[in-house]
Amino acid sequence: MTGNPRFTFFAVLTVLFPLVLALGIVLIPVVRNYADHELAETAAAKSKRWFWGHLLSAIGFGLGIVVSAAVNLYLLWSINRFWAGFGLLLMIVGGTAQMFGLGADGIGPLAVRRAGGSAKLFFDGSRVWVTGTFIAGSILFSLGQIIMVILIGNWEFFLPAMTITMLVAATLFSLSTAVPSGYGLYVTAVTAFIIYLPLAGLFWQLATI
């Protein structure tokens, strides 16, 4: 497993995940209260930031799926195949749902506005479908992420303090979607760095042994 040049590629991907995700989140105009669809309509009026922010965030979660596959299949598979496989499945399904939700939320209101309607109509009608899909995806992705961090801790890849920090971050990552405000996404971005930068360092270390 050690000394494999593919680990350099994995290290780069693992850094890109939180970076791209954070860039997308920062670009999305903040909606202070998701329940206020007029605020959401005002935010969506900044169409370029709204579109590119959601697109980059969706790409970020796509990278997250690839990174989760690398971690679970190349680092954790030999430790516990069942939990590594189950955690990976949760992250694939959850990450895909998040990409789907972000895509719909990013394009839907802009398409309605272009057709001459009010973006508020989209937010009024899509709350259960789009928001529900994103939250469900976030829960599944986060559960898989927590399983991944627990397996990493059991194998002692990192010092206990680092593992605990990553586990707390993974928990906060899951809770951030329950925040009814766009500011919750910033918690998602910060916790992603806390979880994945150490993993990128681990992949880099394996690549240089």
Image (cartoon, helix red, strand yellow):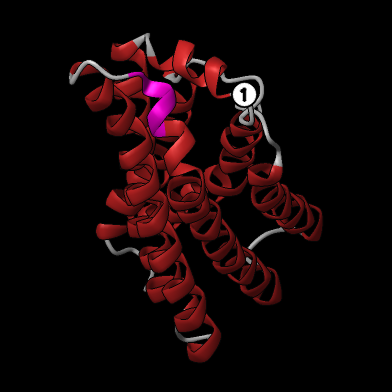
Nearer-the-camera pick, 149 or 177 = 177
Residue receiving disc 1: 36
Which quadrant of the view contains residue 140? bottom right
Query: What residue is drawn where x is 50% and y is 43%?
Result: 127
Identify the main secondary structure in magenta.
Answer: helix
In this rendering, is residue 63 above or below 206? above
Asked if 150 appears above or below 37 in the picture, the reply is below
**Residue drawn at the location 60% of the way across and 27% of the way down:** 182
Residue 174 drawn at (x, y percent): 65, 53
Instruction: Say which residue appears at 63% left-offset and 74% top-offset.
Output: 151
Q: Position of residue 28 (x, y in %)?
A: 44, 20
Kind of residue sitting beneath label 1: Asp
Q: Nearer the viewer, residue 155 or 191?
A: 191
Q: Is residue 209 visible to the viewer in this orientation of the structure?
A: no
SS at badge 1? loop
Q: Residue furthest left?
A: 115
**Magenta includes 120?**
yes
Viewed as shown, does residue 189 lie left or right of 162?
left
Asked if residue 168 is among those painted magenta in the image, a careful observer would answer no
Q: 40 or 76: which is nearer to us? A: 40
Q: Quadrant of the C terminus?
A: bottom left
Task: Residue 46 in the image: state x and y as whole percent.
Answer: 37, 9
Is the residue marked by circle 1 packed among few (<14), some (14-19), or many (20+) residues within 10 Å? some
Is residue 187 depicted above or below 75 in this figure?
above
Give the magenta-colored segment's residue range.
118-122
Task: Give residue 26's position: percent from left, percent from top.
Answer: 49, 19
Q: Quadrant of residue 125?
A: top left
User: Please, is residue 101 above or below residue 18 in the view?
Assistant: below
Residue 90 seen in the figure:
yes
Q: How many marks?
A: 1
Determine the residue positioned at 37% across, 67% down: 69
